[in-house]
Image (cartoon, rainbow, N blue to C red):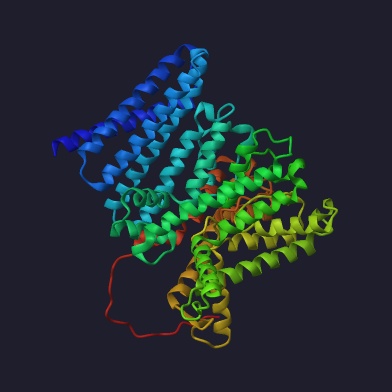
């Protein structure tokens, strides 16, 4: 027992050393005189970690701990071996040049080690804490604070930024919003943009999904409490398979982002305006799939060399739609296609015996198609003689209209200046932003299923029906009640945000501009009428709170804080209330 305590102490000591080294190594510049001692320190830390993990592998008896130790040993040992080979091959070079080649290899080992330790820490926290909703909210809050401090590192920015601006940017990234009070291209260095990219990825998937992925990878199983924590975020009801779902989500996300980056790279390969094409492709693929809306370009997609690149626009649209549909919808549709193909080859009727396509999938897909087509037609008709005039071809007008029907559904990219749009177009975009993407997706908003249930309930009441019936199924009253609660909470939060901005902003501020910005913040969209960069300090914190609440869901937070296990075996007498 005493030996375990000593090992835990050494573990935490190494964590602190690794974290401190990474922060100073990436965040601060040092004089040439200190580069050699810093490299020696890197080698000492790496070798010590290797020896310590080899000892842990032999000491621990549980399968999970041995796997973690073995994985750490393999990664660190492999990178040390690669470093030695690199030094031998380049022995003729000056030793400082050799250090430049070896240092990134060893740094990669420390980063991987620290990420694994961070996931283990998070898993430990939500294993001992009983409230999944609070852990879910807390994980976002901690990542935002950590991201804000990382963005303030000297090497992350070209100059310096305030804590408020760093917090706003980190919140926007983790909440996959895209609103920014700073110009990402000119303010942040490649390191700062990489930190931003990591925050977007973590925010899009959720820290609990990453944690569950590592848990399943090393242990192959999960505890009941782990299942409860991840179940709500992945929208999966079967506790038995919830960790496998988290694994599938991570693999699917990374696969789509890699494919998207390849397509983006092929579309801009001939473009000489973009310097680092590989980083540009990876950044925009992740930003688009996670519906974040951040860009490394000063003017985003409206840059002159991308304005008419319609192939690039369709790639971004595809990534946005995939990310905004939700993992459960994608996986459910995949199951349907798989069984359909099996039918063709085996000549067996499978999908008629089992309901493969769920009611939730049908509602989300139908609502998504209606919103996309409706958005495209409205914007095409309203803007064809206005902002679409710059596109001479019919295909260009169609592409631009489709692009701006897709991006308001929480992505936030734009190729035209929204301040030049007509008021009816802006009002319709506000509506699209409010509805947003689908449940368990990387997008925000009240969600397509919420809007669909609210609309169907209106027709059910108008036709005198006591319940919603659709596709041969009856929708539960709990789902309908939850939909209306989410709808009401969204309007209340947005209303308070509008009121707050009107109080703290100078008199004469355009009301439509404030409304547009607040809907964009709550629905984690990121579209702007060029108002956010000019707002005052208090208004920044109002939008920070609005983005945070919009991402985590106020109802989820209230349920986590207020719900109690209370089985009532009685009912009070029913009484109708006069409404309308």
Q: Is residue 481 left or right of residue 41?
A: right
Residue 59, relative to residue 42: is it above or below? below
The correct choice, above or below, for 51 with respect to 169 in the image is above
Percent position (x, y) of residue 150? Answer: 47, 34
Residue 548 in view: no
What is the count of numbered marks?
A: 0
The answer to whether residue 257 shows anywhere in this view is yes
Q: Nearer the viewer, residue 441 or 85?
A: 85
507 with respect to 542 (left or right)? right
Q: Which residue is found at the position 42% from the left and 18% from the top?
A: 38
Which x, y percent locates residue 212?
37, 52
Is residue 511 or residue 238 the one in the foreground?
238
Q: Residue at x 65, y 43 (%)?
A: 265
Q: Quadrant of the N terminus?
A: top left
**Would residue 453 be found to the left or right of residue 132 on screen?**
right
Q: Is residue 345 above or below residue 411?
A: below
How far across and down, in percent of the image, does residue 47 sit?
33, 25
Q: Position of residue 555 (x, y in %)?
A: 44, 62
């Amino acid at each position: 027992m005493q030996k375990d305590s000593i090992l835990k102490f050494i573990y935490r000591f190494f964590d602190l050393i690794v974290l401190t080294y990474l922060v100073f190594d990436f965040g601060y510049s040092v004089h040439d005189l200190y580069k050699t001692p810093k490299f020696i320190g890197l080698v000492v830390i790496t070798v010590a970690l290797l020896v310590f993990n080899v000892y842990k592998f032999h000491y621990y008896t549980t399968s999970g701990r041995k796997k973690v130790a073995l994985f750490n040993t393999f990664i660190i040992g492999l990178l040390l071996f690669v470093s030695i080979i690199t030094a031998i091959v380049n022995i003729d070079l000056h030793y400082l040049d050799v250090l430049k080649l070896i240092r990134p290899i060893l740094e990669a080992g420390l980063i991987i080690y620290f990420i694994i330790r961070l996931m283990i820490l998070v898993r430990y926290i939500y294993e001992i804490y009983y409230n999944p909703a609070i852990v879910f909210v807390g994980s976002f809050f901690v990542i935002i604070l950590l991201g804000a401090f990382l963005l303030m590192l000297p090497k992350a920015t070209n100059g310096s930024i305030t804590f408020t601006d760093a917090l706003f940017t980190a919140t926007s990234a983790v909440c996959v919003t895209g609103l920014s009070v700073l110009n990402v291209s000119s303010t942040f260095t490649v390191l700062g943009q990489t930190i931003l990219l990591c925050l977007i990825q973590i925010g899009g998937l959720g820290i609990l999904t990453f944690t569950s992925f590592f848990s399943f990878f090393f242990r192959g199983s999960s505890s009941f409490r782990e299942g409860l924590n991840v179940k709500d975020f992945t929208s999966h009801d079967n506790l038995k398979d919830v960790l496998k779902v988290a694994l599938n989500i991570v693999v699917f996300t990374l696969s789509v982002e890699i494919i998207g980056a390849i397509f983006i790279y092929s579309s801009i390969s001939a473009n000489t305006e973009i310097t680092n094409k590989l980083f540009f492709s990876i950044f925009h693929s992740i930003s688009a799939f996670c519906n974040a809306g951040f860009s490394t370009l000063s003017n985003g997609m409206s840059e002159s060399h991308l304005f008419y690149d319609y192939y690039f626009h369709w790639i971004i649209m595809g990534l946005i739609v995939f990310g905004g549909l939700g993992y459960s919808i994608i996986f459910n549709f995949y199951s349907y296609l798989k069984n359909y193909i099996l039918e063709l080859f085996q000549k067996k009727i499978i999908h008629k015996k089992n309901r493969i396509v769920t009611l939730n999938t049908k509602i989300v897909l139908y609502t998504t198609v209606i919103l996309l087509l409706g958005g495209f037609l409205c914007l095409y008709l309203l803007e064809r003689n206005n902002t679409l005039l710059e596109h001479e071809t019919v295909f260009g007008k169609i592409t631009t209209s489709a692009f701006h029907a897709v991006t308001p559904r929480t992505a936030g990219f734009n190729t035209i200046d929204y301040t030049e749009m007509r008021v009816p177009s802006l009002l319709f975009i506000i509506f699209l932003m409010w509805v947003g993407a689908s449940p368990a997706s990387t997008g925000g908003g009240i969600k397509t299923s919420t809007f669909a249930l609210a609309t169907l309930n209106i027709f059910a009441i108008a036709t005198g029906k006591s319940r919603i019936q659709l596709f041969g199924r009856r929708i539960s009253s709990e789902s309908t009640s939850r939909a209306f609660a989410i709808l009401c909470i969204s309007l209340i939060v947005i209303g308070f945000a509008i009121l707050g901005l009107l109080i703290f902003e100078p008199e004469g501020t355009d009301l439509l501009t404030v409304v547009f910005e607040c809907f964009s913040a709550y629905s984690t969209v990121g579209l702007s009428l060029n108002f956010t960069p000019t707002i005052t300090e208090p208004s920044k914190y109002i939008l920070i709170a609005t983005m945070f609440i919009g991402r985590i869901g106020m109802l989820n937070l209230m349920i986590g804080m207020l719900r109690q296990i209370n089985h009532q075996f009685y009912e009070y007498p029913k009484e109708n209330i006069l409404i309308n």
